[in-house]
Image: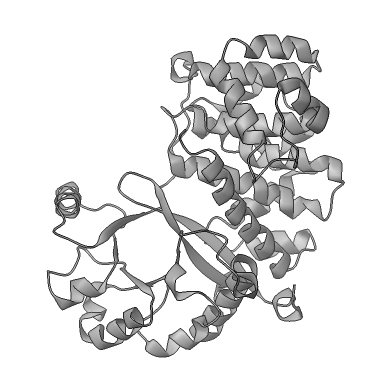
Amino acid sequence: MSPAHASSPGYLSPFVMLDLRRRVVGYRMTWRVGGGPGADRAAGLRAMAECLAEHLSPGGRGWKLGRTPLFLDVTADPSLLACLESLPQENVVLCVGPQDSVHDALPALQFMRDHGYGLMLRGAAEPPPPGSLREVFNYFDVGAGQDAQLLERLAQEQEEGGSPLRLILTEPGEPAPRQQADEGNLQPESTLIMRIMQMLQRNEDVRQIETALKHDAVLTYRILRHINSPAIGPGVEIQSLRHAVTMLGYAHLFRWLSLLLATSNSAANAPFLTRKAIMRGRAVELLGKSMLAPSDADNLFVVGMFSLIDQLLGIPMQEVLARVQLAESVQQAILHRGGVYGPFLALAESCERESGDTARLAEDLFMSPGQVNAAVLAALAWSQEVGAAEAPY
C-alpha cells in the first residue's frame, strides 16, 4: 500500500444495487472523511477513485469485479472527470440528480457519457419523459417508497423494449427475523448442513459424517464443487469428504459449510443478502487477520457469516445457535459484539452503512483507514468470485 493511501482519512462504504428481481447489478460507493461527508467533493472523489483503482484495478490490469460496475455520486460537472482518471470508465456509473437539476445540464451529461461513463439518475420521482434527456441515462434509481403502479409501468416498458433505462433498487432494509422458529421454513438441505456442522463441532468420526452426507448426493456435490472452486480451493483437487478433512481439517470445513448454509434456504433469503453475508464474513476475517493468530481466521469468518444467518434462514438467532452450538467466543461476538472477535464484526458492519462509527471503531483497534478500506474491497472482490462459484448449476 502506498504512503498516500496509508494516510488517507477516508472510509469506503459499499451499498448493493439491485435490479427489480433483486439481483445484484453493482455497488454504490460512498466516501466518508473522519466518519462524515468530506467538505471538498473533488478531493474526496479523487481519493476514493485512487483507493478503488489500487485495490480493484491494480496497475490498470483488469477489473477484479468482472463486468460488475461501481456507482459513484457526482454532480453534473465535467471537471470532476479529472478526479476519476485512475478508474476504467467502462466499469463506472456516475449518479446524478435530482431531476430538476439535470434539465439544464444535458450538454455536461452528454460529455460524461461520451467519455465512456454510465449515468444513473437518482432522487427523481420518475424518469424524464422520452427524449434526449432520458436517452442520456443508462440507469434510473427507483429509490424507496415508489408508487407501485409507476414501478409496474416502468417494468413493463423495460420488458417491451420501450425504455433503454435499467431500473435500479438501492439495497433494501434487512428483513426482520421471525419471532418463532418454523421448521417448515427450512429447506432439507439447511437442516442437513446444520446436522453436519454439529458433528464437526463434536469431532465425530469422518466416516459417520460421510454416512450422514450419503442421504443427499447433491449436497455432497456442492461441498466438493465449492471447495474446489478457484476462489476457495487449496490448489489440489479434492475428491471426497475424507480427502477434504485431510486437506483442510474440521475447522476449515466448518467455515465452508457455514457459507453453504447461507445459500441453502432460497425460499427465505434474497440473493443480495447472501452476497452481503459472504462479503461481511470475509471482511471480518481480513480485518482481524493482522491482529489475531492465524488459527482465528476461520472463527472470524464464521462470526461474520452467522451475524446474518437468522435473516438468511428466516428463523431467530437463538434457534440457529441451539442447532449449531458455536464456540463461546463466537457466540459472544454474534450476540453482543463482544469478546475477542466482536470489535471486528462491529467495524465491518459500520462499513456497510453511512454512520459516524467507522473512524472510532477503527481507531479502537489501531487500524488506519487504508487498512480498513483494503479489507472491505478485498472482501467485495472475493464475494464476487464466491458468488460465481455458487451460481446455479
- The answer to whether residue 72 shows anywhere in this view is no
Q: Residue furthest right?
A: 293
Q: Residue 119 at x, y = what percent?
A: 33, 72
Specify how the rendered protein is coloured. one colour
Residue 153, compared with residue 232, is above or below; it is: below
Q: Residue at x 48, y 19 (%)?
A: 187
Relative to residue 271, is residue 317 drawn left or right?
right
Q: Residue 298 at x, y = what percent?
A: 76, 39
Q: Residue at x 66, y 75 (%)?
A: 9
Q: Residue furthest bottom?
A: 79
Relative to residue 303, is residue 353 drawn left or right?
left
Question: The N terminus appears in which quarter of the rendering?
Answer: bottom right
Q: How many numbered discs?
A: 0
Quarter of image, res 361? bottom right
Residues 125 and 92: in front is 92
Residue 181, compared with residue 116, is above or below; it is: above
Q: Residue at x 45, y 44 (%)?
A: 272
Quarter of image, res 106? bottom left
- The answer to whether residue 144 shows anywhere in this view is yes
Q: Residue 85 at x, y = what percent?
A: 52, 83
Q: Residue at x 38, y 82 (%)?
A: 115
Relative to residue 346, is residue 273 drawn left or right?
left
